[in-house]
Image: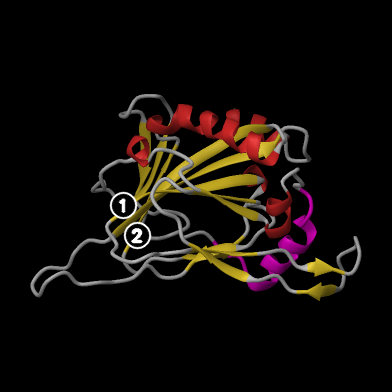
Amino acid sequence: MTEQMTEEQLLFQERINTGTAWTHNEQFEQNGYLVVKDLWDPKELYRPVPEKRGQINYWGKKLDQFTFTEIEQQVEGSLACYWHPQYRSIHSQIRLKLEKIIKRKLYNTYYYDRFYFAGQSLTPHADRDACEISVTVHISTNLDQSWPIWIKTPDTYEDDKKTIILKRGENRSVILSEGDGMIYKGCERPHWRNSMPIEISGIKEKKELYYHQIFFHYVLADGERAHCAFDAAK
């Protein structure tokens, strides 16, 4: 597991980054996130649950071109797949949709999908620079109840120096149906998932529950993090 962000570190990152990824979408600016219904056809995103648990890094366009480690770096016990070939062109196609929504040009950085399993959670954090503008898309699940992602809206500061908070932001839960996406300012907005529900199917067997989603990450083409697109391409 990688070292988790402390509450103090998270508050500091939120404060210094708030307002650095401005767009021309008023609702997105107000809340730091925006839900887009039916962002992509979930049938095109769907993959059956693999047997592996850990982290897969694809280095080519073929399904047998990857490296594998047994420990997923952020959510131990889950499966994260970086650069899965199935989503390469979708990464760019979704970028074009986001550009129309926020009215600013974006560059691709990277993407990965994750299979969560019963009892797993995502600790509160804000993302690195390559995730300036991000979207999480719900692909599929066999849960019989909703499992939200949580996100904190921006604080209101007294002035541009952001030394005094006049009003705290809100912690909001966002429920996505299959194919829905939540665009969010990854470097600015703290986000997390509480523990995934644990349920037992029948008396003798435990049903393997899962939740599959994908993160597509971008940076503003004329923003302060544009260089991350070129770093990711190396």
Circles 1 and 2, Cβ within 8 Å, touching? The answer is yes
For marks 1 and 2, the one nearer the N-term is 1
Give the residue displayed 63% in from the left and 62% down from the top: 190
User: In the figure, is residue 229 to the left or right of 155?
Assistant: left
197 over 213 or under it: above or below: below
Give the residue displayed 78% in from the left and 50% down from the top: 20
User: In the figure, is residue 105 to the left or right of 19?
Assistant: left
Three-letter code, disc 2: Gly
Which quadrant of the figure has residue 23? top right
202 over 15 or under it: above or below: below
Name the spot of residue 124 as percent of width and height, x first. Answer: 56, 66
Determine the secondary structure under disc 1. Answer: loop
Label 1 sits on residue: 53
Q: Which residues are magenta?
A: 3-20
Which quadrant of the figure has residue 96? top right
In reply to whether residue 188 is colored magenta, the answer given is no
Label 2 sits on residue: 77
Would residue 150 be visible to someone looking at this image? yes
55 over 156 or under it: above or below: above
Which quadrant of the figure has residue 160? bottom right
